[in-house]
Amino acid sequence: MVTRRKFFTGAAALAGATAVSRIGAATLPEAASMDSAATQAPLPPSSGRPYNPVVTLNGWSLPWRMKNGVKEFHLVAEPVVREIAPGMKANLWGYNGQSPGPTIEVVEGDRVRIFVTNRLPEETSIHWHGQRLPNGMDGVAGLTQPGIPPGKTFVYEFEAKRPGTFMYHPHADEMVQMAMGMMGFWVTHPKNAGFMKVDRDFVFLLGNYDIAPGSYTPKTSTMLDFNLWTINTRVFPGVDSMNVRQGDRVRIRIGNLTMTNHPFHLHGHEFVTTGTDGGWLRPEARFPEVTLDIGVGQMRAIEFDATDTGDWPFHCHKSHHTMNAMGHDVPTMIGVDQKDIAKRINSLVPDYMAMGERGGSMGSMEMPLPDNTLPMMTGDGPFGNIEMGGMFTTVKIRRDQKPGDYSDPGWYRHPKGTVAYEWTGDMPSAIQAPDAGRQAPGVELTVRKPVGHNH
Ligand SMILES: [Cu+2]
């Protein structure tokens, strides 16, 4: 829920007070704050032009106030504690209580004023990624403005000229501040609320973190070897499902603020890309597909008709990105006979667990975990372990999901005779193929797959 924040707390109070009094405290809009990582209901506009609000997966939209025809928002850059998934919390930097920060929703043509208060221990700025605006509002510290010093509040003001999908993030000590979780979503709705209207409009940002198992704070100098791949700073099974009604036109908007690309794959349906960083695609420029690669710094909007009921995965197709920490340096053991090996190693190393051939699968490992970390592939489903983590979620399509109801309907109940089943009849007595994992006699070959991301 949105909570009222006591504006002046702790050590930042004095520094904050100086900056605020210069503007005049009465003119600062309240900075709403969120204390939950759960998906919040869409926020319908309380004033101004009408629009169809979006739903931020495991996030929320920032309320505003209208002042003399200007939409005023208040973002507070500050340290936050974000629950990555039940069982793991991270010390991050974010906005208004969470990482990512709240989604900002405005309408094409709106005059927008954003107050940004810096409660971080270093300078920051906000870049409004993708917007047309005066150069001095672009938020690049050193180039278009001085950095916002700790304790100070800066004001950004521009007209939301182009409808579409945007992001915001710092352009000051960028590697550190983005590695710590500072980012947010921005949607500029079209002036005509009927333009490309959909029944459900979901948004989320892709993020990456390097948090060693058992620790709470990301390593900020990591360039490529991240171990947590997040959907709005959550990993599966902490990512909420997108719950829709059969027949709905569904839009999903994704922004990529990680350091690599993510091919997102939808099961059971084809989608079309309808929006890019630069705006909306005309119908004749769209083509159907089931996987879309989303590059670094890009935003995409996809749409599909939710025709078939079920629990349909929507996930990054890089298998290391549907995994949580710790799974990245495990050697390949397929083809290696590990009979008795666990027992023998266990006499030297307690808790050793064999993997692959005649060992365990990653999802079935029950290793003792340090505090504050997650199993790397997990998630209890109706048929067992889902063996996923990271950038994985589902679109749940139900015949009886009410319009406007975003609550989780639970697992899909399959109609009789529509689930893969075990063959119990006779097996053919064909000649057995050689055991796939074994080497043919006389061939000497040792293959060891490289481990990690950057070798
Ligand atoms: Cu990915």
Image (cartoon, grey):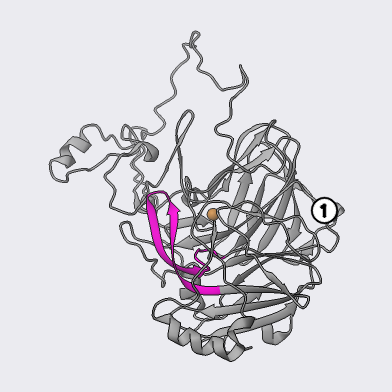
Q: Residues in magenta?
A: 76-101
Task: List x then y, in percent, for residue 226.
Answer: 43, 61
How many numbered marks appear? 1
210, above or below 247, in the image: below
On the rendered structure, is 375 left or right of 94?
left
- Is residue 262 shown to the viewer in this render? yes
Question: Which residue type carries mark 1?
Answer: Met
Name, please, the residue furthest toward the front. 26
Q: Residue at x 68, y 83 (%)?
A: 137
- Is residue 147 shown to the viewer in this render? no
- Dot 1: few (<14), some (14–19), or many (≥20) neighbours within 10 Å? few
Circle 1 residue? 196
Q: Residue at x 33, y 54 (%)?
A: 372
Task: List x then y, in percent, for residue 179.
Answer: 47, 69
The quadrant in which the C terminus is found is bottom left
Q: Quadrant of ligand 1?
A: bottom right
